[in-house]
């Protein structure tokens, strides 16, 4: 699983069943979305977790094998409270899926 630049890294601690890398750790933090998706798929990542809500409008995702999960916020305090739901979604995601998770303001 790959976290893009905006995804809070501490979320990985709530995903014990997944190996998580970040774009920053891999030196991919300067890649544009299309390049990041290419690198991720080529490197064998099955899931990209991002906070880029415009990704589906900026990229043709039809031919992608990687699953994409878009979080509605970069706010770690909000994501932390909702981490169990995010983990459940990630546990059942299928290849070439695109899922947006609305992280509530008040939970």
Image: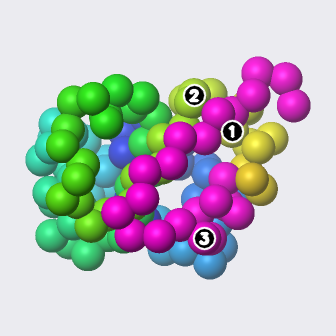
Which of the 4 quarters of the picture holds residue 21? bottom left
Badges 2 and 3: C-beta atoms under 8 Å apart?
A: no
At x 27%, y 67%, the residue is: 65
Foreground: disc 1 or disc 3: 3
Q: Residue furthest right?
A: 107
The circle on residue 79 is 1
How packed mark 2 is, by other alpha carbons closer than 10 Å (few <14, some 14-19, many 20 or more), is many
Give, as a single range, the part of the protein colored magenta: 86-107
Q: How far across and how far down the image is residue 10, in percent?
A: 61, 50
Q: Visible in this render: residue 21?
A: no
Q: Nearer the viewer, residue 63 or 49?
A: 63
Whichever of labels 2 and 1 marks the residue nearer the N terminus, that label is 2
Give 62 or 18, whichever is nearer the viewer.
62
Q: Is residue 103 magenta?
A: yes
Q: Quadrant of residue 58?
A: top left
Element type at mark 3: loop
45 over 26 or under it: above or below: below
Q: Earlier in the sequence, mark 2 or mark 3?
A: 2
For image coordinates 27% across by 29% down, the residue present is 57
Describe the element under mark 1 as helix, strand or loop.
helix
Q: Residues within 10 Å of mark 1 (few under 14, many from 20)?
A: many
* Mark-to-mark CA distance, 2 and 1: 8 Å
Residue picked out by circle 3? 92
Q: Which mark is residue 73?
A: 2
Residue 40's x, y, as percent?
A: 24, 61
Q: Nearer the viewer, residue 6 or 41?
A: 41
Q: Look at the numbered discs 2 and 1 and tell me whether their residues touch, using CB distance below 8 Å.
A: yes
């Amino acid at each position: 699983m790959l976290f893009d630049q905006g995804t809070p890294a501490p979320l990985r601690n709530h995903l014990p069943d997944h190996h998580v890398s970040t774009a920053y750790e891999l030196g991919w933090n300067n890649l544009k979305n299309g390049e990041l998706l290419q690198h991720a798929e080529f490197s064998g990542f099955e899931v990209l977790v991002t906070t880029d809500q415009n990704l589906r409008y900026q990229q043709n995702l039809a031919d992608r094998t990687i699953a994409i999960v878009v979080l509605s916020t970069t706010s770690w305090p909000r994501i932390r409270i909702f981490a169990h739901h995010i983990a459940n979604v990630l546990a059942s995601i299928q290849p070439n899926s695109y899922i947006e998770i609305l992280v509530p303001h008040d939970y």
